[in-house]
Image (cartoon, helix red, strand yellow):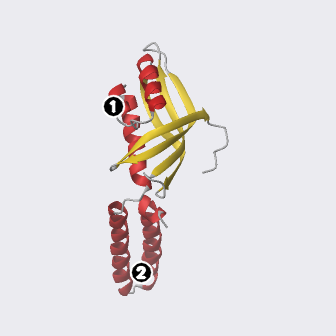
Amino acid sequence: MSWLFEDPTAWIVAGVAVELVLAVALVKTGRGTLATVMLGVLILVLAGVAVEKLVVTDREPVEAELDALAKALEANDVQRVLSHIHPSAASVRQDARSRLPQVQIREARVTGDLEIVVNRLTNPPTARADFVGRIDLSTDGVTRHPIVRRFRLDFQQEGDRWLVAGYEDRDFRDSRPEF
């Protein structure tokens, strides 16, 4: 059911499909009451899209943190990247400090297969994001090296933010781990 609150596509596709059926029926029958029904469907779809925008699911802040982390990587800003890593994740912070200055990242993005699982039963709450990602980087400032890998990022909630507490990357053809 959370899919209704994470992407407006379902509301829009359903609304367009119902409106098309009603429009055909209106043209065939000429009954004016169908225009009223069409207006009602339009209002219902707009309300659904509005609710989808207003409701923030557990998954959405983690996804927003992934997007912000990708932007920090693309900016090649080590300090900004470190701000997305939990203070207690010493090995992750050390990896960022030692590896990032050696490369220039031109693009970092989630390319697909994103799965986010949030566990609110832990204290503090945790989340795991598993996805295929692409990073285009350069070690000499000229030659681009596209890297496509399967990533797993473990997050820990700190206040209202989700910070990276651990990570793993492997060949994207590997099967996904069980959550």
Image position, residue 91 (x, y; %): 48, 29
Mark 2 or mark 1: which is in front? Answer: 1
Q: Is residue 62 left or right of residue 112?
A: left
Query: Is 59 located above or below residue 55 in the figure?
Result: above
Q: Which residue is mark 1?
A: 80
Q: Which residue is mark 2?
A: 26
**Residue in the picture at 62% in, 36% down:** 172
Image position, residue 14 (x, y; %): 46, 68
**Residue in the picture at 42% in, 75% down:** 23
Q: Going from the N terminus, do you reach mark 2 or mark 1 first?
A: 2
Query: Is 94 located above or below residue 64 in the figure?
Result: above
Q: Is residue 52 left or right of residue 110?
A: left
Q: Secondary structure at mark 1?
A: helix
Q: How many marks?
A: 2
Q: Residues within 10 Å of mark 2 (few under 14, many from 20)?
A: some
Q: Is residue 168 left or right of residue 21?
A: right
Image position, residue 119 (x, y; %): 49, 55
Q: Residues within 10 Å of mark 1 (few under 14, many from 20)?
A: some
